Image: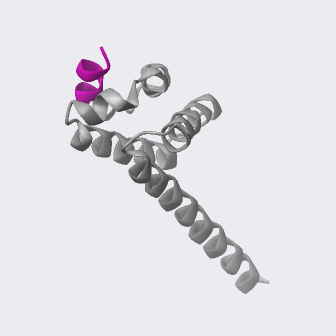
Amino acid sequence: MTMQVAAQLPALLKRFASDELITLALVQIPQYFDLDVIHSSRLGSSFKDLLKVLSDLFFKQVQEQTLEQISKTLRYFASTEHALKAKAEAAVQAIAERLHVDYQTCFDEKLSDV
């Protein structure tokens, strides 16, 4: 089942990104993926697309539950031993760096207003 869902999930997340309830449900699904199956089935590009969509959603969502589930999914990808772990770790690192830059920008703007 992982193979069928993993291939379609990035497109589904893009399609339903504006629907908070559907997005919340969809971002939880990868937490049940067999990540070795994704690699062995040559779904690396779908995995990469999924990481990109999850990263984009992380910065667009405002619902706490959805953000928590995206984080939980990314943590699962980055903490589980599998062949695509490095890609997941890179995606998490990119999110952390963007958060740092955004925070620093806001902080610098506040300082310049004083």
In the picture as drawn, the residue positioned furthest to the top comes out as 1
Q: Is residue 10 visible?
A: no
Q: Percent from the top left, x then y, of residue 19? A: 41, 25
Name the residue rendered at 47%, 19% in the picture: 25
In the picture as drawn, the residue positioned furthest to the right comes out as 114
Q: Percent from the top left, x then y, of residue 75? A: 57, 40
* Residue 10, magenta (yes or no): yes
Magenta highlight range: 1-12
For residue 37, side relative to residue 114 (left or right): left
Residue in the foreground of this view, choosing between 109 and 97 = 97
Residue in the foreground of this view, choosing between 83 and 97 = 83
- Looking at the picture, does residue 40 appear above or below residue 55? above
Name the residue rendered at 51%, 44% in the picture: 78
In the picture, which quadrant includes the N terminus?
A: top left
* Residue 114, magenta (yes or no): no
In the picture, which quadrant includes the C terminus?
A: bottom right
Residue in the foreground of this view, choosing between 67 and 78 = 78
Query: Main SS type for the magenta part?
Result: helix
In the picture as drawn, the residue positioned furthest to the left comes out as 42
Q: Percent from the top left, x then y, of residue 8? A: 24, 26
For residue 2, side relative to residue 4 (left or right): right
Name the residue rendered at 25%, 32% in the picture: 40
- Looking at the picture, does residue 100 appear above or below residue 92? below
